[in-house]
Image: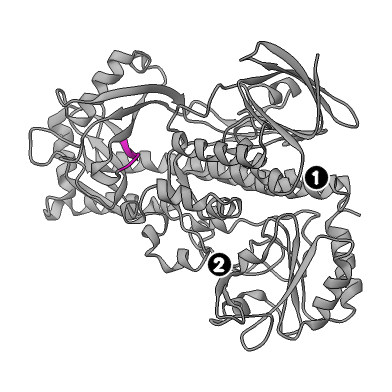
Amino acid sequence: MPEFDTDVLVVGGGGAGLTASMLLSRLGVAHLLVSALPATSALPKAHLLNQRTMEIFAELGIAETVYRRGTPPEQMRYSGWYAGLAGPAGDYGRRFGLIESWGCGGLSADWAVASPQRQTNLPQIRLEPILKSRAEELAPGRVCFHHEVTAFTQDADGVTATVLDRGAGRPYQVRARYLLACDGGRTVGRQLGIAMEGARDLARIATVHLSADLSAWARDPEVLIRWLSLPHTGGAATMVPMGPDRWGPDSEEWVVHLNYATDDPRGLDDEQVIADLRAALGLPDHPLTVHLITRWSIEGVVADRFRDGRVFLLGDAAHRHPPTGGLGLNSAIQDAANLAWKLAAVLYGHAAERLLDTYEPERKPVTARNVRRSVDNALNHIVTAQAAGIVPGAGPEANWRQLRRLWSGLPEDAGPARAVRRAIAAQSMEFNEHNVEYGYTYSSAAVLPDGTSEPGNPDPVRLYQPCARPGHPLPHAWLDDDHGRRLPVHDLLRPGRFLLVAGENGQDWCEAAAELATAWPLDAVRVGHLDGDLLDPRSTWTRHRGHGPEGAVLVRPDRFVAWRAQEATDATARLSQALRSLLGH
């Protein structure tokens, strides 16, 4: 059997695996990606891409492609609630709720100051080919689809896997120092006996991917997701445009999610699902083409461990989310960003093996919180539907009577209308969970506390508060160089390297960094409002750095703050000790 030796074997070619491959390539780490699937996903699945993910894509050189292919920002500013889509009466399709979503397409100042990148929307069926193409460009011949891991063993020095090239019908062996399980939990985690813990089978969904011209009824161009209350059926549905070339009401393709009770057999029959789709949309005869029907259950589960020896779990192999909030794919991509630089540091000899022990304590709490948030987001939609008064089995007349109270303007209907408005406002827990998406923090041996307290936050779900406290994400700030060019502080980081950002009087820190850079992957820069290698024209960095002119902040390669110092006393010794501690020596 042919043998292949590499440093890292990536199993799975979805968002987590392809991102891991690209990051490892950028870090110069030898690796092989194998995916049992013959091609990238045929399912629309996840589509929202948050700011943290887009920062990673910018580093990988694909952000502009994703933005160009994705939803224009002005067409994803809101989510809306409607009385169905189409029907014989004038109230069909009436909008009764609207909420700003994901920074309101760039109009929210809070989101604009958080990151140089904005949110976007691109279905996974169109995102994954972009990721795959870039991964192949960075690692020619090392991204192998239709290659399935059929068995593996691990020992103290590495992992040995048997891979079947399904196209050629030939097996081969791969010997790697580490294995990344990005296979959705289908193979690797099960073989290791890793359990998934949490809520399962909360609801059953049938998702229909279709082509149709719905522009006559989906009239709000600024709305991305449409939540349909269906008085005529007693149910609910969700509509999301899928592009690919036009968005908003003119989208050529759509995804419609239909809810079924866990014991309802209708959701298992394709013809019945299509009939239910037409009934939900109120379009019994309108031309439409169904591309695919998929069925899935809402669950929120997390692996009992993210590491087993030399095997690491990423993405759906480690955590699975309801789609509400769009946290699943983003968490998977951010898993890869957390782990890739640590693997490179160990493989290059800059870090001790124990640095890899920080992956689970950093990522598991974050992804477990994301799973809880996703479940809560889904449950709150049930609360909204109940407040609207739609009851299965009550009949169209009774359901319409309840729903029309929301816009009747009658004094006796003010209470129900207010309850629905409050329930929709509460859905900002999904559409404006900025601190969940961007402000999450890490606590592990790869973060050195500086004795300061966690800043108070009146709303830890919605309000992201930038700061350069150890464990927090690097705050965004625009800086100017001596040629008048403006760049974000994020762009100062180079792949696999730490960055020391010193104050305007931090010459000692920069000299210490230059001395230590012969042994450590380390860069340094002085930043101040009036002096420094780069200037802080809006004093944004000065506001967030948390130290004076002689202090410094040490940033990890994944753009999280690792360490902070208030003054430059014994700069070389203190910086050396910080690096040794952070890297596990």
Q: Distance of mark 2 from mark 1, alpha carbons?
A: 29 Å
Up-down: is 483 above or below 52?
A: below
Q: Is residue 239 highlighted in magenta?
A: yes
Magenta stretch prevailing secondary structure: strand
Count of numbered tags? 2
Does any portion of residue 100 appear in the rendered image? Answer: yes
Residue at the extreme left of the image, as rendered: 89
Q: Look at label 2 and name its amino acid.
A: Gln
The amino acid type of the residue labelled 1 equals: Leu
Q: Can you tell which mark lies on residue 356? A: 1
Give the quarter of the figure containing the N terminus: top right
Q: Secondary structure at mark 1?
A: helix
Quarter of the rendering containing residue 568: bottom right
- Range of magenta residues: 238-245
Q: Residue 505: x and y, percent?
A: 75, 86
Residue 487 occupies quadrant: bottom right
Q: Secondary structure at mark 2?
A: loop
The answer to which of 259 and 312 lies nearer the viewer is 312
In percent of width and height, residue 310 lies at 81, 33
79 left or right of 479? left
Tell me, yes or no, if residue 325 can be seen here. Answer: no
Q: Which circle marks residue 110 in the picture?
A: none
Q: Which residue appears at 44% of the width and 28% of the height?
A: 43
Vertical placement of residue 513 versus 473, above or below: below
Q: Is residue 69 above or below residue 18?
A: below
Mark closer to the chain start, 2 or 1: 1
Q: Circle 2 is placed at which residue position?
A: 465
Mark 2 closeness class: few <14, some 14–19, many ≥20 residues within 10 Å: some
